[in-house]
Image (cartoon, helix red, strand yellow):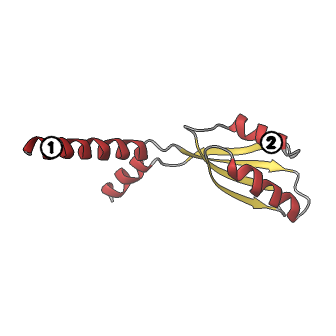
Amino acid sequence: MKTMKYIKLMLTALLMTLSINAFAKADKQVVTFSVDLHCQGCIDKIMHEIAYERGVKDIVCSLPEKTVVVTYDANKTDIPTLQKAFDRIKKPAKVISSAQQMTQKEDNNAEKVK
């Protein structure tokens, strides 16, 4: 009986460790694309198609500025892959800027320093 409890405890600890490590490795990055946007239909097409690309976490479109800001997990996708996704919907995207956001682990360390 004690052996079963010990095994359950060890499995629980292992699962918790694995889930914490997976969460800490998120590598969020932000890229801003210049895209030829004409109307709300263009934005709807981007929101519908690009949002479902692997690794995409958030999309913000600006019709007046003709930009699309994509937040993505760099472990799952990259800028060339995102550009190919734009090409598939006939909306070529040119990179204006890209920046790496803090990972969850770095964010937690920053909070400890305060």
Q: How far apart are the alpha carbons under marks 2 and 1?
A: 58 Å
Residue 86, image x and y in percent? Answer: 80, 44
- Asked if the residue at tag 1 contacts the one at tag 2, i.e. Cβ–Cβ closer than 8 Å, the answer is no
Residue 49, image x and y in percent? Answer: 76, 51
Write down the quadrant of residue 82 in the picture: top right
**Element type where label 1 sits in the image:** helix
**Element type where label 2 sits in the image:** strand
Disc marking residue 94 = 2
Task: Write the residue at 75% across / 57% down.
Answer: 47
Question: Mark 2, residues whose alpha carbon is within 10 Å: few (<14), some, or many (≥20)?
Answer: some
Work out whether 21 lies above or below 64. above
Front position in the image: 90 or 48: 48
The quarter of the rendered structure image containing the C terminus is bottom left
Looking at the rendered structure, the kind of residue marked 1 is Met
Q: Name the residue under label 1.
A: 4
Residue 11, image x and y in percent? Answer: 25, 42
Work out whether 34 lies above or below 77. below
Q: In this view, does 109 lie to the left or right of 91?
A: left
Task: Write the residue at 44% across / 41% down.
Answer: 25
The quarter of the rendered structure image containing the N terminus is top left
Task: Write the residue at 39% across / 47% down.
Answer: 105
- Name the residue at the left extreme: 2
Question: Mark 1, residues whose alpha carbon is within 10 Å: few (<14), some, or many (≥20)?
Answer: few
Q: Is residue 2 left or right of residue 40?
A: left
Q: Is residue 41 left or right of residue 62?
A: right
